[in-house]
Amino acid sequence: MNEIMQYNGKLFQILQKTIDAQFQVEGKTIDKHLEYEMVRRPPGVRALVVQNDKILLSHEYRYELDKWDYRLPGGKVFNTNDDYCDAVKRNSLMDDVIIALKKELLEEVSVEIENYFMFDISYCGLKVEWDLYYFLIDQFTQYEDNSIQKSEFEYIENQWFDFSTALKLCLNGSISEKRTAYEIIRYIFGRKER
């Protein structure tokens, strides 16, 4: 696999990539050569904070939607592509993901993590790389924080929902980040199967 940088912005890169693939289909060997453009963005982190059959959601004002939206608490792991590339070179990506997880939860929903489990990694696909790391948090301390303005641009209110209501928010579009809605649904139904 080869890649050539076409554009390198603060958070987005556009790469020209080539892949040579060989695989089997019905006993035949298939050789493919692909050339394509790909957009890369540093990964994000999201947390399924659960307790007593309830899940903690952020109610955030989202500028890109021009409305309030429900989300799992979380955010960016890196503020720049350069930081992301440095972490990959240092082989410290997962350490940085955990640091961001703890930082974002404390800032957004006043939760200090006592225990966490990797739940899933959501990948976009061949032409867009923007991985979201999902963690299950079931042991934590939540501090009281009634402030909604978390930074100059972030307005976040945290709310606990029973699983039934959370499912409704996923299915009725109140959670606009579809990957997150999927992970919530997957967690709730997977929990019922155990």
Image (tube, grey):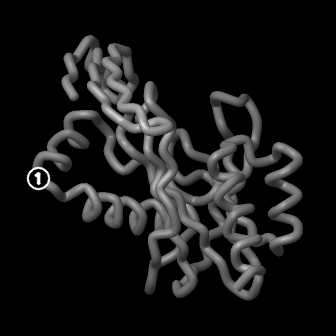
Q: Residue sitting at 43 percent across and 38 percent down?
A: 27
Q: Is residue 57 left or right of residue 48?
A: right
Give the image location of residue 103, x and y in percent: 40, 63
Q: Is residue 88 left or right of residue 22?
A: left
Most foreground residue, 86 or 154 = 86
Q: Quadrant of residue 12?
A: top left
**Crowd around label 1: few <14 · some 14–19 · many ≥20 (10 Å):** few
Vertical comparison of 150 with 101: above or below: above
Q: Is residue 162 left or right of residue 178?
A: right
Give the image location of residue 145, x and y in percent: 61, 71
Q: Residue sitting at 25 percent across and 64 percent down?
A: 95
Q: Quadrant of residue 193?
A: bottom right
Vertical comparison of 189 with 20: above or below: below
Vertical comparison of 116 with 93: above or below: below
Q: Residue sitting at 33 percent across and 40 percent down?
A: 79
Give the image location of residue 99, x and y in percent: 32, 64
- Kindly identify which residue carries mark 1: 90
Residue lying at the far front in this picture: please name it: 27
Q: Amino acid at mark 1?
A: Arg
Residue lying at the far left in this picture: please name it: 90
Location of the C terminus by quadrant is bottom right
Location of the N terminus by quadrant is top left
Number of numbered labels in the structure image = 1
Q: Residue sitting at 71 percent across and 79 percent down?
A: 191
Dot 1 falls on a residue whose secondary structure is helix
Give the image location of residue 16, x and y in percent: 29, 15
